[in-house]
């Protein structure tokens, strides 16, 4: 493909921008590759694992995540505890656009918690606490030792909000895996609840069978992984059971040179068999709040999503 | 502003995406701020300095740069030597989309030079050499000791290509500042030429008067700075003469923590008086090949560009 | 403090280098601040939480971690599942120094797994599988529903190796928290074991009481956090229970601008009350394999460690 | 090489730390490789090009640079304009350790300029202005159209300070290349001087012959490149004339994925013939203020420097 100097139009729908990007070079080309690869994994009817981190649910990306779950575009979600916190709270109360460069001590005194340039009042977490207390009690009536997937599904059943991914996952029977579920406000609430109900617990080994069944039963598997950490690794790690993913896309800002899993490229996963030797894979570098809406918008315009 | 979960439409023109980004958080919000700030600097009739690095001219971004110069949207360009090399070559010969992860020794044997994931045959530089030899001879007939600005203008006068920024800068009398002009293929050609014409030279102090006049004569100044290095600093450094820029946008991937100029944020420039205390400024982090077309596309749709 | 141009000696022990760094600027100064702050948290007899990621245990850093546990310099460890995998395997079998830029498909065919520039044969994980099968059986005889802390302690009791942090934590009764324990080879083994022993499980809520007791009982708390992800957040998140850490050091390569927890600076945690308003805190940027041995070596030479 | 868990000693001279690093993995191993490679380039009697950026001269690294020039360890220096500014000023007046997170508007009002976490009073630049006015006048008496190398050598002849690299380069006849010399306080002074002396100028093409002679006359060439930008590229670009460097070390924090020269790895330069196909090369990632003193300290202890 020849590099083509971009010629913007009077109107530039996402798919037109992405078409330009394919012949632009650098990350523009990688982004165009990602769009194309998602279309291919869908054509191949691959089982799609969708992985993202909590900060993204705090951001406006949540609406895009909800749409993908609403349309059953993805077959499983893998995420972190904070995603549950934010998805629940945002179903009832709004977050605010703030700034990165602020006086955090002053924020603390005002009862505002900062996530990058997003502000969340502490009061929102008190609201979450009340909700969870009630919900855990109800869930406890049915089951004492729950799995993260069961807990996520139960919470999804309690929500009724079109921008909630948990709501749509429940509705559409899309499993939500959350191996690190104890590390968030939800974990804290589980702890408080357990103090009065000692036989309540969250058994994280319980979901392994569910994800193993999904992985082993699939003809082909694919992963769209936004960010790093436990949600990234759990996704590729569980695909080891079948000899690796057939398709993989990483969207990341992390550096490779410290040997961290978060910064590891797709090809490192090939050495492990977490991604297949012949798998098609793309790495796109940058902030998902810009890259991912652009990718999904282009896929919508192409009638893929 | 409240965080709003993104709801993508069936069709998503750039300005609609950017409208969503404003209430998305993280870099999406920064990008929306940048779009808004460019509109404001234009409304305020500020003199706009436009700074970019050579790799971007090798990429498809060149078409966007050419459009901004064609429409006289910017009042001065500040760039590096390689930008001249690439702008000239690409006016005649194409570059190729390649890949980051390739065998560079094999590429070398095939006579292919790599810029990230862009491939350029060595033969292209031989073509450039011939062009420059002829052009320098002609220029030398008029002037022995040229300035980078004069050289850029002369080269622009030799081109006839709608995607060339040098062509449009010449046409529209937009000065092109290139303080590091000797560091590129063009510098090498100047060196070869000088061997036979010892009184030929490039006096880099000559352009200081031109940029000083521009800076001092402006009611307000603004800078749109893509990437780092000498083109970034020369832009803000020359605005020190007037007590700083009134508006500044940095688009960058560089880290702040090593104290480098490339990684420095806009607020560091305020301590120096390179950006005014009260200036409005935005930093957007990510690859310009994605971010900048999106910004300009939105501005076009808003009828600002 | 004035910037002092570094004058290296004929011999340069770590503490002398760090003394120079204090007046060097950029990250050198941050590193010197970190050394000083660790000395201070120790003088203040703070309860020290020590957090790191799995890749670091694969590296030679493991020896430094083991020493800190052996000397009871730290009071609690917070880490990820992979740390357990690597600590166990390396107690019996060696890893290899490899390279970042290699053919991962070729590695896979040779049965070698890559972690950055570290190579681990697949056979090592088969060895791990056997060990764990036996150990889980033994543990199961005592307890059906274990906590990550209990599992880590049990594994530590099975090791006898001076460079193992699990061994020393067991020996010295230092709790090891591993909220994401299911995401690693150990999680996979737990899954296989559970297939034949359905009432076996890992209840991650069980450890919350242990960490809460530690956090609430401490006069002062401090955290040394290497890397990001779940081990970083669990450490600061649990200190929310007491109104925040009194001292915190982050060593990281992650960027702040994507709003991720991994990239968040110490001051963001102050807005949440995870670090106290008046806490002393330092962020050092770079790869822990270089920075952390230098820090600990200086502290040893100062007789702090 | 097997990964060896680091065992720190009671005293840890730099060379001992580096010895440990060789078997540590990640960037520790890269740093150890860099030390070894510098020893090798020296044994091979290669002509060593030493490239660094201005911010590093503002930091304490300046003392290390001066030592390498004092001992004639390097054969040529390639740097940016700001390095001259800082080297001159620091020969008379001190800089201060500051902080990254400060109120830059407040700093500006106090007349303090910030370089990362280094503070420089504006008054220091006024001092520089006076010095340069006098020196340019004197130089102008001898030569009207100077080259950057000549200017640097002249300035070095005016200094008398053991931590100045310009002083030692003059003393030891080590050429200092500064292709972007106009982009700094020195460029501004040249501009002011030219207003009264219109036939004064800086011809940047003049030094090409000098660097070409050096490059072409060398049996082997090597480069130690700290940071990116014009000083990095000018170093590798001029070695194109001889078919590439035989040895190269990059110490950098920049990302590769945006296609920038600053982020490009050594292997990209092989495709261009700026580094030879068979050259030995190492990339080390991190802040030079920590990495480079460690490298040079180890080399001193090994009696290489």
Image (cartoon, coloured by chain):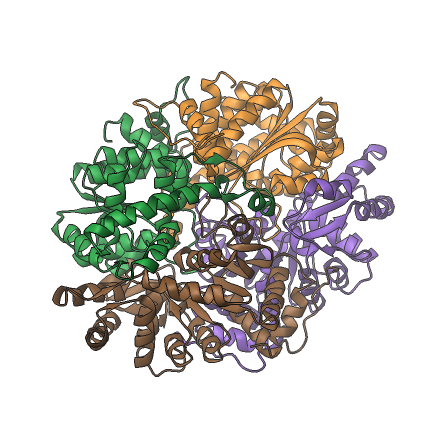
Chain colours: A orange, B green, C purple, D brown
Quadrant of the rendering where the C terminus of chain D is positioned: bottom right
Seen in the picture, residue D225 relative to A143 is either above or below; the reply is: below
Hey, which quadrant is residue B212 in on the image? bottom left
Residue A3, given in percent of the width and then of the height, sits at 44, 33
Query: In the image, what residue occupies the spot 34% across and 50% down?
Result: B80
Residue C193, given in percent of the width and then of the height, sits at 82, 38
User: Toward the viewer: C206 or D225?
Assistant: D225
Image position of B268 (left or right of B121): left
Image position of D185 (left or right of B291): left
Specify whether residue D157 is in view.
yes
User: Toward the viewer: C178 or D155?
Assistant: D155
Residue C301, given in percent of the width and then of the height, sits at 61, 77
Hey, which quadrant is residue D197 in on the image? bottom left
Query: In the image, what residue occupies the spot 57% across and 82% down?
Result: C10
Image position of B197 (left or right of A52): left
Image position of A113 (left or right of C38): left
Quadrant of the rendering where the N terminus of chain D is positioned: bottom right
């Amino acid at each position: 493909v020849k590099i083509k100097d971009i010629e913007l139009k009077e109107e530039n729908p996402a798919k037109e921008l992405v078409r330009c990007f394919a012949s632009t070079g650098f990350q523009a080309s990688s982004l165009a590759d990602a769009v194309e690869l998602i279309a291919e994994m869908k054509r191949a009817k691959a089982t799609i694992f969708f992985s993202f981190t909590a900060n993204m649910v705090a951001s406006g990306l949540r609406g895009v995540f909800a749409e993908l779950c609403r349309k059953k575009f993805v077959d499983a979600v893998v995420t972190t505890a904070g995603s549950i916190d934010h998805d629940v709270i945002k179903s009832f109360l709004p977050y605010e656009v703030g700034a990165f460069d602020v006086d955090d001590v002053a924020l603390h005194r005002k009862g505002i918690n900062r996530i990058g340039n997003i502000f969340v009042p502490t009061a929102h977490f008190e609201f979450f606490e009340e909700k969870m207390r009630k919900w855990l009690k109800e869930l406890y009536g049915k089951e004492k030792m729950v799995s993260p997937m069961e807990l996520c599904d139960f919470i999804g059943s309690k929500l009724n909000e079109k921008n909630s991914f948990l709501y749509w996952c429940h509705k559409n029977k899309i499993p939500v895996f959350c191996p690190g579920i104890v590390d968030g406000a939800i974990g804290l609430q589980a702890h408080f609840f357990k103090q009065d109900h000692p036989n309540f617990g969250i058994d994280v080994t319980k979901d392994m069978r569910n994800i193993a069944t999904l992985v082993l039963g699939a003809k082909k598997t694919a992963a769209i992984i936004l960010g790093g950490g436990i949600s990234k690794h759990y996704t590729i790690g569980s695909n080891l059971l079948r000899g690796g993913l057939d398709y993989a896309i990483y969207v990341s800002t992390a550096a490779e040179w410290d040997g961290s899993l978060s910064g590891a490229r797709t090809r490192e996963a090939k050495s492990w068999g977490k991604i297949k030797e012949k798998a098609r894979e793309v790495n796109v570098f940058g902030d998902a709040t810009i890259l991912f809406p652009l990718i999904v918008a282009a896929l919508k315009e192409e009638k893929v999503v």
